[in-house]
């Protein structure tokens, strides 16, 4: 966080999205213990297995390096999930972090299968260095899809990331269908590029060919300020 004014902007934006979720019957909560997060995801019906990016057994995350969001309905059942973590890439870049498999495993030599591989040709990823916040594991239960919860989750992810780290970039890897169907535009990412991650993780059963989407740090800050002003206007 850069200054007290930014903190005030963020607080108002988070409050706005919390109210938005509540109006949809969802109570949001935030955590930093990823062992707890994996326990929640593993007991959530229809939620696929969480990527090793967010699993402490493969890629430990300190409390100041990541957070997760869970939303529960009025029956206290999990309806939405997402996670965000920070990569410190001052001497590297996101493309290299992906291709060396360090984005997925703290120790690729220990955990990666011999046939695991990741190819990243997105030029945007090669320019991402410094503090890079990665946003992923987004899941919305079927009965809440199309109800605006993806925008709420992205808004919370952006605001909390800015508050915790003021990153140089915030990014995600998304399937091509999410780009085609406009899901990415609802997230609010300003940039998108094919070739983000052609990935195979044998033991995880993962075979993906994802696009890279991202915001720069300045775009993130501008979004927070703009949303805070918009929320204030609506409240008047």
Image (cartoon, helix red, strand yellow):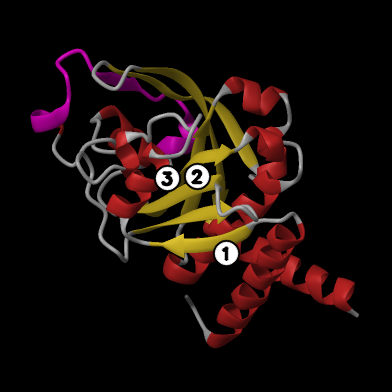
Q: Dividing the image into 4 quarters, which one contains the C terminus?
A: bottom right
Foreground label between 1 and 3: 1
Contact, mark 1 vs mark 3 (Cβ under 8 Å) = no
The residue furthest right is 236
Q: Is residue 139 left or right of residue 66?
A: right
Horizontal and vertical percent position of residue 139:
54, 38
What label sits on residue 171 in the rendered view?
A: 2
Horizontal and vertical percent position of residue 148:
74, 46
Within 10 Å of disc 3 (Cα), the crowding (few <14, some 14-19, many 20+) is many
User: Does the rendering let one see residue 159?
Assistant: yes
Could you tell me which residue is drawn at 16 percent across and 19 percent down? 113
Foreground label between 3 and 2: 2
The residue furthest bottom is 4
Could you tell me which residue is drawn at 70 percent across and 23 percent down? 180
> Circle 3 sits on which residue?
128
Q: Is residue 16 left or right of residue 235?
A: left
Horizontal and vertical percent position of residue 165:
42, 66
Q: Secondary structure at mark 1?
A: helix
Could you tell me which residue is drawn at 54 percent across and 86 percent down? 4
Could you tell me which residue is drawn at 52 percent across and 46 percent down? 81
How far apart marks 1 and 3 lie (CA) works out to: 20 Å
Horizontal and vertical percent position of residue 203:
23, 19
Closer to the camera in the image, 187 or 166: 187
Decide: is 76 above or below 222.
above
Say whether disc 1 or disc 2 marks the residue closer to the N-terminus.
1
Q: Is residue 52 left or right of residue 171?
A: left
Closer to the camera in the image, 118 or 36: 36
């Amino acid at each position: 966080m850069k200054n007290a004014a930014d903190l005030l902007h963020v607080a108002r934006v988070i409050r706005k999205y919390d109210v938005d979720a509540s109006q949809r019957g969802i109570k949001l909560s935030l955590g930093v213990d990823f062992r707890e997060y994996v326990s929640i995801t593993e007991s959530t019906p229809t939620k696929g297995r969480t990527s090793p990016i967010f699993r402490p057994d493969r890629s430990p995350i300190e409390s100041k390096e990541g957070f997760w969001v869970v939303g529960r309905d009025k029956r206290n059942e999990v309806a939405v999930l997402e996670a965000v973590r920070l990569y410190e890439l001052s001497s590297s870049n996101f493309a290299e972090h992906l291709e060396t498999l360090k984005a997925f495993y703290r120790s690729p030599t220990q955990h990666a299968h011999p046939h695991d591989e990741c190819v990243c040709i997105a030029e945007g990823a090669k320019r991402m260095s410094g503090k890079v916040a990665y946003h992923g594991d987004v899941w919305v239960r079927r009965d809440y899809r199309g109800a605006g919860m993806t925008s709420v989750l992205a808004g919370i992810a952006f605001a909390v990331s800015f508050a915790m780290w003021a990153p140089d970039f915030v990014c995600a890897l998304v399937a091509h269908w999410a780009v085609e169907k406009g899901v990415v535009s609802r997230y609010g990412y300003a940039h998108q590029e094919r070739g983000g991650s052609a990935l195979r993780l044998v033991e995880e059963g993962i075979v993906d060919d994802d696009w890279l989407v991202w915001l720069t740090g300045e775009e993130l800050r501008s979004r927070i300020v703009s949303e805070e002003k918009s929320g204030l206007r609506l409240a008047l």
